[in-house]
Amino acid sequence: MQRRKLLETGSTAITAAIGAGFLGSCTIRKANNQTTNTNPIGLPKVRWRMATSWPLSLDTIFGGAETISQRVNALSGGNFQIKPYAAGELVPGLEVLNAVQSGSVECGHTASYYYIGKNPSFAFGTSVPFGLSAQQQNAWLYEAEGIKQLNNIFSDFGVISFPAGNTGAQMGGWFKQKLNGLRSLQGLKMRIPGLGGKVMAELGVNVQVLPGGEIYLALDRGAIDAAEWTGPYDDEKLGLARAAKFYYYPGWWEPGPTLSALVNQNAWNKLPSEYKAIFNAACFEANLEMLNKYDSRNGSALQKLLKNGTELVRYEDEILRAAEAAAFQIYSDIAAENSDFRQLFNQWQRFRQEIYSWNKINEFSLARHSYQPL
């Protein structure tokens, strides 16, 4: 399909808006250090609906959508408003891209790897097995043209995407029974999406894809034997520890998963440039804020789970080695058949090799020392 012209990256658009004096005109600083909104002259009132893939109970991940809504409202003086809806209120949690593409909603908040059936390249917009950490992912998206490459593909669907949240490195899932090598994966029913699901399928797992709000009941009632979601804070809220005892790590399939704000291209084109800059800025804030929240909350949540009987288990090296080999074979196989995937994967892999080499020197070496008992 014909590629659509992409928007400039967030920093450029935000700078343009500031240069126009818009963001400064949206607020007036009062003597008592409070902020009062004023209406920018000549800008229209815009009302959007945002479908999401998240239940309301998950305040941090649904909070990414709320952050976008709140900041857009505040920076536009109330003229540009976005109302987020939980999964199932407007559309099912795994159909957000369809809703945005069709124009039934103007925007959505979701994980792009839910839609690898449309194009496997969408996996890179969230996370891929043995891929990038949250900071590495941000560096690739913002500085190494990851966003541009992804939007070249999203444009075929009449959609534009923005990084808008990150959970940080995830856990490796909940299992009703402890694993015993690769053979214990054969026929096991597990909820796991994206290319991580394809890797597990290669290892013999019967892969299921369910939205967050349906995981607990499926696991508790035995419809599935295992499930992954995000990490201790959200997993505890979903009650997964009541349905399964064994909590595995590391989450090799999602080392730094990004959540995305998707916008219908026609709706985007109708926005004034000032509103586009505001939306960009709000997504950037949501991306950073969500990661900060998860990093600050997961540690204490994990201790709570362990105190209440959860058993922490490391994946066996046999499984990790087999999973990594399967992952990169899958990447090679898809790249051989899909030109979008091949172009994106080749660039992504070069970036991964460079940043892994650098981080082995600056961060990983320090972590190996600092995490040793004193």
Image: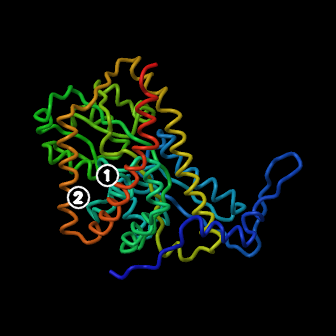
The x and y percentages for residue 225 are 21, 34
The x and y percentages for residue 152 are 39, 72
Amino acid at dot 1: Val
| Residue designated by label 1 | 128
Name the element at disc 2.
helix
Q: Is residue 226 above or below residue 115?
A: above
Q: Which residue appears at 47% of the width and 39% of the height?
A: 57
The x and y percentages for residue 4 are 43, 79
Q: Which residue appears at 45% of the width and 33% of the height?
A: 233
Nearer to me, 151 or 263: 151
| Residue designated by label 2 | 331
Q: Are marks 1 and 2 in contact (CB under 8 Å)?
A: yes
Q: Is residue 137 above or below residue 361?
A: below
Gap in angstroms between the C-alphas marked 1 and 2: 10 Å
- Residue 56: numbered disc: none
Q: In screen coordinates, is 290 left or right of 200?
A: right
Nearer to me, 338 or 190: 338
Amino acid at dot 2: Tyr
Q: Quadrant of residue 200?
A: top left
Quadrant for the N terminus in the image: bottom left
